[in-house]
Image (tube, rainbow, N blue to C red):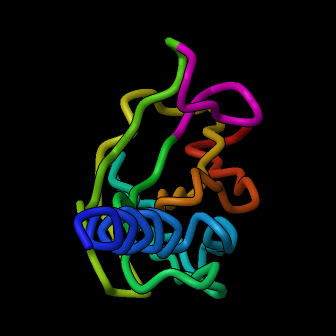
């Protein structure tokens, strides 16, 4: 009887660990609009495929002078919008420090299956 309880508990714990969206995929997002004025960028994104997950561990944007922006390098700035959200749209307004240059921006979403980034959008901030 004692072994049956242990086996049942072990099976239950294994089932819980295997549930979740790691068996699915990362979320897919797209940038829906951008507006740049006086060094301020307002950007909106929508998650078009949640990857089978009910929530997102993190949502945000990243930008860089280099294409593509990469969350793992020192040249990319990350703008975190939310943690542990169930919302499929998110937005932010932030300052791009340099004028007369171009920035490359992407939206990112992290769920328990991993991190994904949207297509990169080029934001010109002047004549270039």
Foreground residue, 106 or 21? 21
Query: What's the residue at 39%, 37% (across, down)?
Result: 78
Asked if residue 14 lies left or right of residue 118, the reply is: left
Foreground residue, 72 or 61? 72
The quarter of the image holding the N terminus is bottom left
From this view, report whether residue 35 is shown above or below residue 32: above
Query: What's the residue at 50%, 61% (across, down)?
Result: 109
Inspect the magenta stretch and tell me whether residue 101 lies in it. Answer: no
Magenta segment range?
63-73
Q: Position of residue 123 (x, y in %)?
A: 63, 51
Q: Position of residue 102 (x, y in %)?
A: 65, 37
Residue 68 picture quarter: top right
From this view, report whether residue 93 is shown above or below residue 11: above
Residue 17 picture quarter: bottom left
From this view, report whether residue 19 is shown above or below residue 76: below
Asked if residue 112 lies left or right of residue 27, the reply is: left
Residue ranking furthest to the top: 74
From this view, report whether residue 55 is shown above or below residue 95: below
Query: What's the residue at 30%, 68% (across, down)?
Result: 9
Q: Position of residue 34 (x, y in %)?
A: 52, 71
């Amino acid at each position: 009887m004692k072994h049956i309880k242990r086996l049942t508990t072990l099976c239950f714990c294994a089932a819980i660990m295997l549930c979740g969206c790691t068996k699915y995929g990362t979320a897919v997002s797209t940038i829906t609009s951008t507006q740049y004025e006086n060094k301020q960028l307002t950007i909106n994104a929508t998650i078009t495929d949640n990857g089978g997950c009910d929530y997102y561990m993190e949502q945000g944007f990243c930008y860089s002078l280099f294409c593509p922006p990469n969350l793992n390098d020192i040249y990319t700035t990350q703008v975190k919008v939310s943690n542990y959200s169930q919302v499929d749209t998110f937005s932010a307004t932030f300052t791009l420090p340099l004028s007369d240059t171009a920035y490359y921006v992407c939206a990112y979403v992290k769920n328990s299956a991993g991190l994904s980034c949207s297509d990169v959008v080029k934001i010109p901030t002047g004549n270039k």
